[in-house]
Image: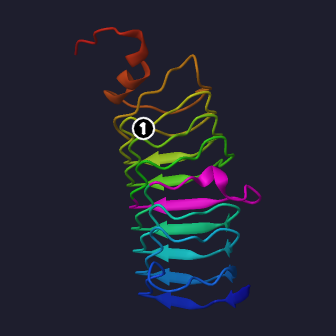
């Protein structure tokens, strides 16, 4: 196990070279490839990932404490397998399609300009989170806590109001029809 503090990692391909597990604090990863890589049992604290591909990586027991992802590919990740202690993310311009946050408590998370197609948010606590200009096509919200969550600028969501806690959540027209899909009704504008 290694410890890195305030180190910059640029254009490394961890699918072709060994990723050193350990503690990464205040580190920056730019243009790195973690795709299909096993980064389990690693701690990332106050780190930034820019233009990285982390798709289909194994993140079991990985700690993500105050992590920012910018223009990253994070497809097919099972975030529910990572360490939930102090779990905190910020996502901007990221592709998170086919990932899962099932059962996590990730209050106040910001997803900005992200694609979240078929992401599983079942039983996830997203209270006071923000989905700004996100595509939530076929994303799953089932018994999710969405108290005060802002969906007002996002599209393609389908959220069943009776199966989720949507108290004080923000939605906008015409996307609010995504709250009525379960009722098989026709909305005429």
> Is residue 83 shown in magenta?
yes
Characterize the local packing of mark 1: few (<14), some (14-19) or many (20 or more) Cα atoms within 10 angstroms: some
- Say which quarter of the image contains residue 28: bottom right
Instruction: Tell me how many marks there are.
Output: 1
| Residue nearer the viewer, 16 or 183 | 16
Give the residues in magenta. Answer: 76-94
Query: x, y percentage for residue 173?
Result: 34, 28
Name the residue rendered at 54%, 90% in the picture: 8
Q: Main secondary structure of the magenta part?
A: loop
**Magenta span includes 133:** no
User: In the shown orientation, is residue 15 left or right of residue 67?
Assistant: left
Q: Quadrant of the C terminus?
A: top left
Residue 57 position (above or below residue 114)? below
80 or 87, which lies in front? 80
Q: How is the image coloured?
A: rainbow
Q: Which residue is mark 1?
A: 152
- For the N terminus, the quadrant is bottom right
Considering only vertical position in the picture, is 99 above or below 149? Answer: below
Please indicate whether residue 7 sits to the left or right of residue 131 in the image. right
Q: Is residue 71 left or right of residue 20?
A: left
Name the residue nearer the viewer: 106 or 97: 97
Rendered view: 166 above or below 124: above
Residue 57's x, y, as percent? 51, 65
Looking at the image, which residue is at 72% across and 59% down? 83
- Going 40% across and 33% down the picture, which residue do you hit? 157
- Element under disc 1: loop
| Residue 77 in the image: above or below residue 161 | below
Task: Locate residue 146, reporting x and y percent.
Answer: 59, 34
């Amino acid at each position: 196990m290694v410890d890195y503090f305030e180190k910059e990692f640029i254009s490394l391909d961890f699918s072709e070279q060994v990723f050193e597990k350990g503690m990464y604090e205040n580190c920056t990863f730019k243009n790195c490839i973690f795709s299909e890589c096993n980064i389990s049992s690693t701690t990332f604290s106050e780190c930034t990932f820019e233009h990285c591909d982390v798709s289909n990586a194994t993140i079991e027991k990985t700690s993500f404490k105050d992590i920012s992802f910018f223009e990253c590919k994070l497809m097919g990740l099972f975030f529910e397998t990572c360490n939930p202690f102090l779990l905190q993310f910020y996502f901007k311009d990221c592709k998170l399609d086919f990932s899962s946050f099932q059962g996590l408590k990730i209050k106040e998370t910001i997803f900005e300009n992200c694609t979240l197609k078929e992401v599983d948010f079942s039983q996830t606590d997203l209270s006071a989170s923000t989905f700004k200009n996100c595509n939530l096509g076929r994303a799953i919200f089932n018994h999710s806590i969405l108290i005060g969550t802002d969906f007002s600028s996002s599209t393609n969501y389908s959220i069943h109001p009776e199966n989720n806690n949507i108290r004080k959540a923000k939605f906008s027209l015409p996307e609010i029809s995504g709250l009525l899909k379960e009722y098989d009704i026709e909305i005429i504008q």
